[in-house]
Image (cartoon, grey):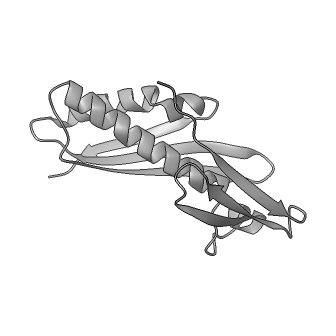
Amino acid sequence: MATTRQAHTVWEGNLLEGSGVVSLDSSGIGEYPVSWPSRAEQANGRTSPEELIAAAHSSCFSMALSNGLASAGNPPARLDTKAEVTFQPGTGITGIHLTVEGEVPGLDEAGFVKAAEDAKANCPVSQALSGTTITLTASLVA
């Protein structure tokens, strides 16, 4: 069954001086302030579209990797994934870098990297973001 998730933003004012609030409607878990300076300069307690993309990508990738590892007979004990989305004002999103460290009993480094590359290519968020360069660093931790 397909699912649809919803969020909305209320923006007031112009781009440079205005601000908005992003609401996560489907989960109801919160409202988050957003502004141009929080996007193009320092976060200063506000979020940005790129941070929200990073959150979506790191969680989707982790789910895809966990599923791939478990399906191959090596369920992970723990995955720690960071997504870094780079935004260049005037250009847009110029790249995404995923870094994952995993604790996977019985799996060697090469097997983990291969599974991580597969998850990077096949997670739905990676596929939705295929118009930008996505890079990956994957390693096992003891």
The answer to whether 71 appears left or right of 128 in the picture is left
Q: Is residue 94 above or below residue 89?
A: above
Which image quadrant is residue 46 in?
bottom right
Disc count in the image? 0
Q: Residue furthest right?
A: 14
Residue visible at 81% across and 60% down in the picture = 11
Q: In which quarter of the view is residue 69 placed?
A: top left
Q: Is residue 91 above or below residue 34?
A: above
Q: Residue furthest left?
A: 106
Between 137 and 22, the residue placed more toward the observer is 22
Question: Residue 52: x, y in percent?
Answer: 58, 53
Residue 102 appears left or right of 83: left
- Please identify the residue farthest to the bottom as the structure is shown: 44
* Left or right: 83 as drawn, with respect to 43: left
Residue at horizontal 36%, vertical 33%? 64
The location of residue 78, given as percent across then percent down, is 23, 49
Q: Is residue 142 visible?
A: yes
Query: Relative to the observer, which residue lies in front, 36 or 114?
Result: 36
Q: Residue at x 62, y 44 (%)?
A: 6
Please state which of residues 13 and 10 is positioned toward the viewer in this rendering: 10
Residue 108, position in %: x, y? 15, 35
Q: Is residue 113 visible?
A: no
Q: Nearer the viewer, residue 76 or 4?
A: 4
Q: Does residue 10 sit above or below 1 in this rendering?
A: below
Q: Residue at coordinates 42% horizontally, 46% vertically from top-left?
A: 59
Q: Would residue 18 be found to the left or right of residue 75 on screen?
A: right
Q: Is residue 18 above or below residue 68?
A: below
